[in-house]
Image: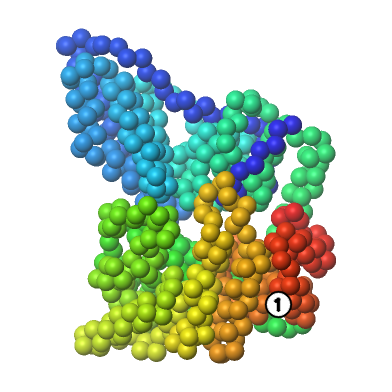
Amino acid sequence: MITLKGIPVSPGIAFGEALVIDDEGFRIRQSSIRPQDVNDEIKRYEDAFDQAKQEISTNIANVTKELGDYYGLIFQAHLAILDDSTLREEILKKIKTERCSAPFAISTIFKQYAEIFRKIPNENLSQRANDIIDLEKRIMRIVMGVNTETLTTINKDMIVLAHNLTPSETSNMNRNCIRAFVTEIGSKGSHTAIIAEALEIPAVLGTGKFLNKVQAGQKVIVDGHQGIIYIDPTPEISAQYHKLYTRERELKKQLNKLDQTPCETKDGTRIQILGNMELEFESRNCLNRGADGIGLYRTEFLWLTNELQLDEETHFHKYKDIVDTMGGKPVTIRTCDLGADKILKDIMPDTGRNPALGLRSIRLSLFMPEMFRAQLRAILRASAYGPIQILFPMISTLTEWRRVKMIVHDTFEDLDERGIPFNHKIPLGIMVEVPSTVMMIEEFLKDVDFISIGTNDLIQYTVAVDRTNKDVAQLFNGCEPAVIKLIWKTVTEANRHNKPVCLCGQMASDPALTMLLLGLGLRSLSMPPAAMRDIKRVCSSVEMLRCREIAFRALRTDNAGDIQSLLQRELAAVLPDYRLEE
């Protein structure tokens, strides 16, 4: 048996035979062509590009229809690459001046471009190499007349094992037969990971090299919860996971009943369950899972999916549509949080050598005030149609917050002068995600309407760890005593000042942490729709007195390992059949 560990990007348990996809690609031997054949090779290359564009256009239409505009836009980038004049001129020049075949010219130039992107130190940009590789594969199949089996034609249960999967390959998978996929490279932020989550296919990325150790047809188990893969599992492992799989399916059926049930603890304490969303269709998912509203709308994805600076009207209609969908339930809109690993090269300045500590989030908005004001005007206009509150990311000093409020009030005056209606009492709040904010939380609470704790960045900046780096991923831990104490101080002060406080990071989605968070004083949690049933189940099984006792013990413990053990024991005590994160 071979056991692999990677990054879990889409949850679930899956069984199947290994389908090994060799990522060596097309290796084209260089050969000279006769001068009289140059025009034929040029036509061959042009015809291949035209056919590829037709295929991609069809792909865009299909993906958009099934998954929504965002996922179709991923492949719009492929069309843009094919229309790139510099790339096409280089291929043409290579055919003409070096008298090489169309396949060799295309493959050589595409590989050069992919290598350029791979060397870019920014992960978001380096992921573009995958799009170029995807295109090369498509065009080479066309230009060489290769008719290969695609992932759409698989007709039995398979687990795809690959060095990498492109967005096109992922989106075209036959979900009735492909049960999961595993890749040697990749990260949570890749397009492939995003599509896997949307398709609800269990997926694990970034395992490191392993394809040379496996063969097609071997039995595979994928645990998308923990990022574990078993190749040729032992009978004991197989039996264990079949039991877990059956239990998971039964539990999902039971949890469906919780969707439209208000979240309350066993002793009647009401817990507000809100939804995190990035893409428009997710607001409907939040409603279907019984969310009390939207606790975090990450608006930066509007820029990331459009690759341009959106105008005020576009923003306004996007926000109004979500408010309309939520039907009177509150919507918390966070202003643009670009920067760090979310780079938009067309409009952003140089991110510097350490983008996580550079011009990002609210700092970028203050650096680009016109873009900031346009977004604020759009949000305020949408507030005339339903309950909206504005959340500002990564506020680290009171001076920064006062600059933000001054711009907001200037925007109020601008809309008033134009006679445009909006909610003049719209709540304004801040993300608490850096230690400096916690240290000054009493002063901030005197000047904000609400706060939201962003634990992803709070952990990162407290423990000084890059949460996207696999080599130090074990240090990114919400059970670190320093993190727990920062949350406790924030919640305690918010409650003392009678200001609403919500926690919206990944910690809100982890059932093992739910009792701790309730015991620390939180009564509002915001999470992805897929996590809501599990969190509701935990809440309905616990009493507040026990939660406070757990929090008290955690606050007196000086290492994360002991706190994790405590929380796992307590979860097992109230939900003996809960297993997925063991």
Looking at the figure, which quarter contains the C terminus? bottom right
Relative to 363, is 523 above or below?
below
Q: Is residue 543 left or right of residue 83?
A: right
Query: Can you tell which quarter of the image residue 108 is in?
Result: top left
Looking at the figure, which quarter contains the N terminus? top right
Question: Horizontal and vertical percent for residue 62?
Answer: 42, 47
- Is residue 203 or residue 72 the one in the foreground? 203
Residue 494 seen by the camera: yes
Relative to 499, is 558 above or below?
above
Relative to 576, is 71 above or below?
above
User: Could you tell me which residue is drawn at 48 percent across and 51 percent down?
Assistant: 189
Amino acid type of disc 1?
Gly
User: Could you tell me which residue is drawn at 71 percent across and 73 percent down?
Assistant: 555
Query: Can you tell which quarter of the image residue 38 is in?
Result: top left
User: Could you tell me which residue is drawn at 20 percent across and 37 percent down?
Assistant: 85
Q: Is residue 164 left or right of residue 582?
A: left
Residue 328 seen by the camera: no
User: How many marks overall?
Assistant: 1
User: Could you tell me which residue is drawn at 35 percent across and 89 percent down?
Assistant: 424
Q: Residue tagged by mark 1?
A: 519
> Of helix, strand and loop, which one carries label 1?
helix
Q: Is residue 74 left or right of residue 574?
A: left
Question: Horizontal and vertical percent for residue 409?
Answer: 31, 85
Question: Horizontal and vertical percent for residue 485?
Answer: 63, 73
Query: Can you tell which quarter of the image residue 414 is in?
Result: bottom left
Relative to 417, is 336 above or below?
above
Colouring of the image: rainbow
